[in-house]
Image (cartoon, helix red, strand yellow):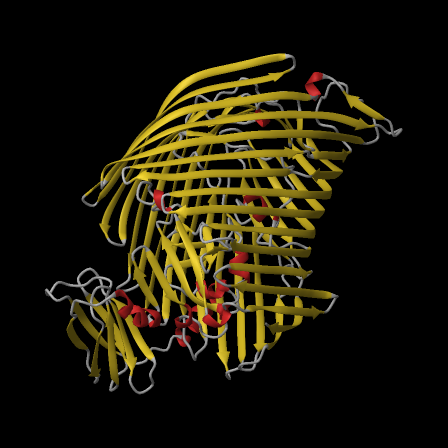
Amino acid sequence: MKKKLACLILLFLTTVSFCQNIRLDGVVLGASKNPLEMANVMAVNTETKAMDSYGITNDKGKFVLNLKPNSSYSIKLSYLGMKNKEITLTTFSQNMTQSIEMDSGGIELEGVEIVREMPVSIKGDTIVYNADSFKSGTERKLEDVLKKLPGVEVNADGEIEVEGKKVSKLMVEGKDFFDGDTKLGVKNIPADAIDKVQVLRNFNEVGALKGVENNEENVAMNIKLKSGKKNFWFGDVNIGAGADERYVVNPKLFYYNPKYSVNFISNFNNIGELPLTIQDYFKFTGGFKSMMKKGGSSFDVSSNDLGISLLKNNRAKEITTRFGATNFAYNVTKSWSLSGFAILSESKTELETKSQTNILDPNSTDVFSTENREENANQKSHLGLFKLSSSYKPSTKFQFDYDFLAKLSKQDEVNKIVSQSIDSEGETIQNIDTHKIQNPTSYNQNLSLYYTQSDKNVFAFEMQNLYQEEDPFYNAISQYQPFVLPGYVTGQSTNDINQNRFVKTNKVDAKLDYYYMVTPKSNLDFTFGNTYSYQIFNSSMFQILDNGNTNELVDPADNNKVNYSFNDTFVGLHYKILTGKFTITPGVSFHYYNMTNSQLGVSYTNSFTRLLPDFYALYQIKKAETLTYNLSFTNDFTDINKLAEGYVLNNYNSLFSGNKVLSNATSQVHSLRYFKYNMFNFENIFANITYSRVMDAVKSNVIFDGINQTATPYNSNDLDQSVSGNGSYGRSFLKDYKASASLSLNWSKYHNIQNSVLAVSESFTQSYMIKASTNYKDLPNLEIGYNTVINDFGSDTFYTDKPFAKLDYYFLKNFSFVTEYEYYHYSNQDKTVNNEYDFLNASLIYQKKDSKWEYKISGTNILNTTSLNDDSFSQFSTKVSRYTVQPRYIVFSLKYNI
């Protein structure tokens, strides 16, 4: 591994060929000799007409330009409120200094042309990137462009991160692009259509609330299209084929004009491309936000999914996908707009996994029992998402929004398992067949009214409704039945156990906020809100006997018929004040809770009141440097799933029984966040630390019999704690280079009861990454990096070392070559696990200038790696898994650009 890493570093150093530049240091002053911050400075070579360097002044008016020696330059400057200025100079072989004064009296439009040519410019809370300044010619989609922008990252899940914050909304020409998810835009918007990338910091869709709420964590992104892509259909159709009947068909079509927009995306393939995974589906919000985040209560509706096996790094033994999506926006009138999307996805997946699970003795690193498991799972998944939104804004004083989101799915998994269990009583091997079916549906509605009565009075009413039905079915056929279930017939040649579940949820959140502007820099927020939820949980078990007859397990312990209602009525008061460089928002909320659950002919009711404080403070050190502190107290409530006392079969070796008298947990969270973005040297610093302590946490009382477990929840008197921190440092320099370093740390301590003993478990996970990249126009570009992950689970520690590299090169005016390489070394502390594997992908594209046709040959998993590793921790056990992945594919494809 060290040799491979050294080769990567050597390759990077040979690629980064520094030419002899001279440095121009300068300062930009206003008419009164005061330094101008955020002035745009650009150096244009008068001979080649190329922009050789650019910069933005810091708070002292300083800028630095790296220029070629013995050349003539036109230095262009712009600053809002000042007249544009242009000076000429000739460089020699020595560094230079220059002081430039700008004259007042300019208008905003005068700076438009210079800003348009600047690679990066800032106007208020908006950062504007000129996409062409960062393109080298190999970019094919938005993701490729974003990864080259200073301060912008795209993670493995297609989520965009700016300044350490996730982008919550992606727009194209100001219109939502599949609201609630950035992955579809990142993976599909053509790079050649992108003119500008606008990062909208402190984003709030409701103008009336922008000054009265704290929006520092909200970031959106808007893509501006090139003029030739507006009022015209654009996109592409890609068709490819390879050996072993491999294929990919990927048409994309887009249309934008000021009145409406329409997008179509589809993808049919069996080469492992997944436009939408099951994980994406379940986290897809559709743009619905948590409207009760200031309320002090958390009532989250948990999922009843059966633990359908998920992909690792979007890889599996075999994946076949059919995907189609459309997105639209339509301005009915100047004040009324409609938007929405429809997404349909069908996939067939084959997973092959080998794993070892070690169940630990409580408060010890000793192993209590071990399960070695081989699984072959076949999944079928049908996913559907549909959204319709309406926004009515007749004036700046009134806004009425309505949103509807439907999520429909049908999932089926058949799994063949060979399980070897080892404990103090010996070894047991058995074959197990499981079948999981689930068809959950959910419907979300949102209604919002915003009214500004005067400069001092603002009203905001928001209401959300969630209606959800889940009907998971589980079947396990095994040689041994580990649990004692009343009414179960023993002595059968096989144990064929089945369980039906039906869970219905109807939840309504409503909140009215009244904002009163005490002064131009302070306001009061009075909140009146209510959360009401009603849930039904029914479950039943039955057994298929050897003679084919059905044995219904009718004992109350094997069944559930539960009704549960939850109500939280609250009032809140927050005071926001801006004083000097500080923004401070103390707040408090008063709650009245009422809960009733009925089961087994008995009703249990609990009512109480609670006062919950919160506090927010922002220190604006400089324009682009902040320190933020947050404190919150939250009452965390469980939903019906942990209250139902009848047995629930979670897995062939896991039985669960709820606790109807569970009470809430109370969490206290402190977070401190530092951020700095320096446009002078394009330096980006982010750091965050969060401490959480949970009192009366809902924990598990588990009885282990070998590898089999029976669990029930309880409220713990012991304090659960966690500390997490992450940070990053990134910088672009010398125009063509970008480097960054990041880390993520998480320590947690939990308490449970295991075999009647209080078990304390700790875990500490660490992730460190460094990377550097070039961005030349006419030379090969290289990105290299190194990522190490350390997972310390107490009983064992697992290490993953991953050096990686990417090379892209646009050459001979028509060819693009891109290759990506990842090497993994996976091991544990005593080296009983010690695996090495790597992945190499590459593509060569030929497209003649101004031609609509593109020819491509691509290879996936060129080294034909067969599997990858993963590990996990569950507070009682550690698990190490090895997943089979798809083999090498070589695909020839043809694309026509519309």
Residue 705 in the image: state x and y as whole percent. 64, 27
Left or right position of 471 against 777? right
Q: Residue 40: image x %, image y %?
A: 26, 68
Q: Quadrant of residue 545?
A: top right
Q: Is residue 660 above or below residue 135?
A: above
- Vertical relation: 844 (above or below) 371: below
User: Image height check: is 688 above or below 430?
Assistant: below
323 left or right of 693?
right
Q: Residue at x 33, y 41 (%)?
A: 213
Residue 703 sits in quarter: top right
Is residue 229 visible in the rendered image? The answer is yes
Q: Kindly indicate the quadrant of the structure image that contains residue 874.
A: top right
Quarter the C terminus occupies: bottom right
Q: Is residue 490 visible?
A: no
Count of number-bearing discs: 0
Q: Residue at x 78, y 33 (%)?
A: 479
Q: Which residue is more in the foreground, 840 or 292?
A: 292
How far across and down, in percent of the image, does residue 296 sit? 40, 29
Left or right placement of residue 416 versus residue 71 in this view? right
Q: Find the residue positioned furthest to the left.
A: 32
Measuring from the top left, give residue 176's x and y in whole percent: 49, 54
Q: Residue furthest right?
A: 547
Front-most of residues 247 and 22: 247
Q: Going 84% across and 30% down the picture, which residue do you hit? A: 493
